[in-house]
Image (cartoon, helix red, strand yellow):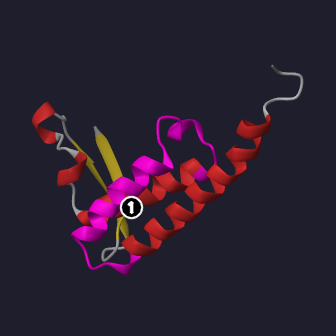
């Protein structure tokens, strides 16, 4: 795998290339809190866009992971993201309720 990134202090691009092995892959729960926050923020953005890349994701699963992060962190960004995810979930559920209650026009 090849990873290319811009180093903050050196102001230049660096590239790392090496083989990835199964032992290199860790469970998501063991990832550093900063990586999990960034990953959850990215997934939230994809969920909001109804992106192909988030088709297996859900606000519920995202909120659960963020709750675990809140419990182990004093980072206000985690709590703020959890608040936004909960608001989006509430809005999504509110939008779904009228369609579920009334059914589809011309339906059963």
The image shows residue 38, relative to residue 51, as above or below, that is below
Q: Identify the residue at the far left of this view.
A: 23
Q: Nearer the viewer, residue 35 or 69?
A: 69
Decide if residue 50 is in sight here.
yes
Assess whether residue 84 is covered by the magenta stretch.
no
Reply yes or no: does residue 76 show up in magenta. yes
The secondary structure making up most of the magenta span is: helix
Q: Which residue is mark 1?
A: 38
Left or right, residue 39 beside residue 91: left
Q: Which residues are magenta?
A: 48-77
Q: Residue 103: x, y in percent?
A: 78, 32
Residue farthest top in this picture: 108
Quadrant location of residue 106? top right
The image shows residue 108, relative to residue 15, as above or below, that is above
Does the rendering let one see residue 35?
A: no
Mark 1 surroundings within 10 Å by alpha-carbon count, few (fewer than 14), some (14 through 19), many (20 or more): few
Q: Quadrant of the N terminus?
A: top left
Determine the residue positioned at 33% across, 55% down.
65
How far across and down, in percent of the image, does residue 21 sit? Answer: 15, 32
Which is more toward the observer, 48 or 105? 105
Is 33 above or below relative to 52? below
Quarter in which the C terminus is drawn: top right
Question: Residue at 45% across / 49% down in the picture?
Answer: 60
């Amino acid at each position: 795998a090849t990873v290319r990134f811009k180093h903050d202090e050196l102001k230049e691009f660096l590239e790392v290339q090496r083989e990835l092995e199964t032992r290199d892959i860790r469970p998501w729960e063991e990832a550093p809190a900063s990586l999990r926050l960034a990953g959850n923020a990215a997934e939230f953005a994809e969920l909001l866009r109804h992106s192909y890349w988030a088709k297996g994701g859900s606000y519920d699963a995202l909120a659960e992971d963020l709750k675990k992060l809140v419990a182990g962190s004093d980072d206000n960004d985690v709590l703020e993201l959890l608040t936004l995810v909960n608001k989006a979930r509430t809005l999504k559920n509110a939008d779904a309720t009228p369609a579920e209650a009334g059914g589809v026009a011309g339906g059963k």
